[in-house]
Image (cartoon, helix red, strand yellow):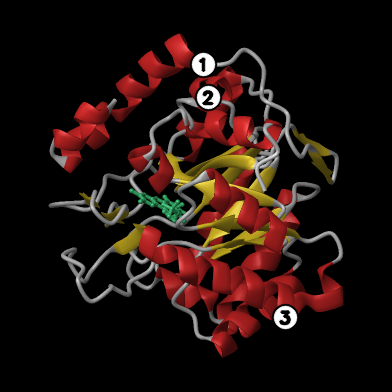
Amino acid sequence: MYFIKYLPAGLAHSLAPLGLKIYSDFCGVEETPQWRPFTWRGLHFQNRLGIAGGVDKDGDHLQQWMQLGCGFAEIGTVTPKPQKPNPGMIVARDWDNSNLWNKLGFPSSGAKEVSINLMHANPSIPILVNIGKNRNTSNALAAQDYVECVELLKDNADIFVINVSSPNSKGLRDLQNKEYLTGLTSAVVNKSAQIPVLLKLSPDLNNHQLHESIEAGMVGGASGFILTNTTTHRPETCQFPLEGGLAGKDLAQKSITFLKETLRILGNSRKDLLLVSVGGVLSERDVHERLDLGADLVEVYSALVFKGPGFFQEVADSFSRGLQ
Ligand SMILES: Cc1cc2nc3c(=O)[nH]c(=O)nc-3n(C[C@H](O)[C@H](O)[C@H](O)COP(=O)(O)O)c2cc1C
């Protein structure tokens, strides 16, 4: 798979589904590896590691995620209507520092099409469906877009994720403000009925904002949080453009800090709220660390690029070897 490193990022991105299919057909597992199994609100997770939002935006590779050993999969971000990616360069990789950059901006086949994909896949692992608004929908009307996604996808989602944290859709992150967030969350929670709703937050919130977003989400009825999306901050030596979001190794510390801070903010009121850690998880040890810190589930995107699709199996093996 390492020839991928020598291809331009855009081409590698386009060829990834084919590579994934070939790898999972030849090297995949028949049964989901079981380690640290977990049941939450009636959903059974054979293990705690899955793909992050953005890896499979339209839910058309579910068979492959199961073959690779994912304990669950987050699909999306799905928008109500189909839309194309942002123009120009939209992905880049820094192999030396294991960092990934993107400004994709929610390319989506649209909620109707994605619901058909999910229905045909009939997955045996829990499915999180990450939802967003269309590019041309104003923040004032955003809740309608999220609610429309829920209406179209609710028969095929085990958990909904409200994405208000991508840096690539203009103004989206403002929806994390408490003025919007309680209303948006409760509109989605009311429409999704029994299906739990999580909020995915940005690592660029300050402590006060994180506190307010968590409180606003809980008042709106959120059942948990995903920490974190990509960052607009850049390390000093970073060559990536200033627009767009950075993922990978240089996001790890922020993601860990947000997990710890969220646990501190929730304290005894955490109860059965689900906490999902994502950002800079690039080794078996990183997965162990996030779970030991208190995450219920862990997700990866960059690890798929820098470590390859065998990552899920390597993590499963590390748990069976009892890696500490
Ligand atoms: C190319 C790319 C596309 C992404 N698309 C989405 C998306 O559509 N929705 C979303 O919530 N997060 C998206 N993300 C963010 C990831 O879900 C994740 O939060 C971030 O990459 C940090 O994890 P990592 O360090 O393991 O890559 C995307 C990330 C990348 C690199």
What x and y, as percent, mark residue 260? 65, 73
> Which residue does the numbered mark 2 point to in the structure image?
68
Q: Is residue 126 visible?
A: no
Q: Nearer the viewer, mark 1 or mark 3?
A: 1
Contact between labelled residues 2 and 1, with CB atoms less than 8 Å apart = yes
Residue at 73% in and 28% down: 34
The CB of the residue at mark 3 lies under 8 Å from ligand 1: no
Residue identifier under label 3: 265
Going by the numbered disc 1, the residue's amino acid type is: Gly
Real-space CA distance between mark 1 and mark 2, rounded to the nearest whole angstrom: 5 Å
Which quarter of the picture shows residue 233?
A: bottom left
Mark sitting earlier along the chain (1/2): 1
Figure quadrant of residue 284: top right
* CB within 8 Å, label 2 to label 3: no
**Residue for point 51% across, 16% down:** 28
Sequence-earlier tag: 1 or 3: 1
Q: Return the mark for residue 28.
A: 1
Is residue 161 in view from this perspective? yes
Q: Is residue 308 above or below residue 84?
A: above
Name the residue type under label 2: Leu
- Badge 3 marks a residue whose secondary structure is helix
In the image, taking residue 236 as reference, residue 158 lies left or right, namely right
The Cα–Cα distance between marks 2 and 3, rounded to whole angstroms, is 35 Å
Q: Using the image, determine if residue 194 lies above or below residue 312.
A: below
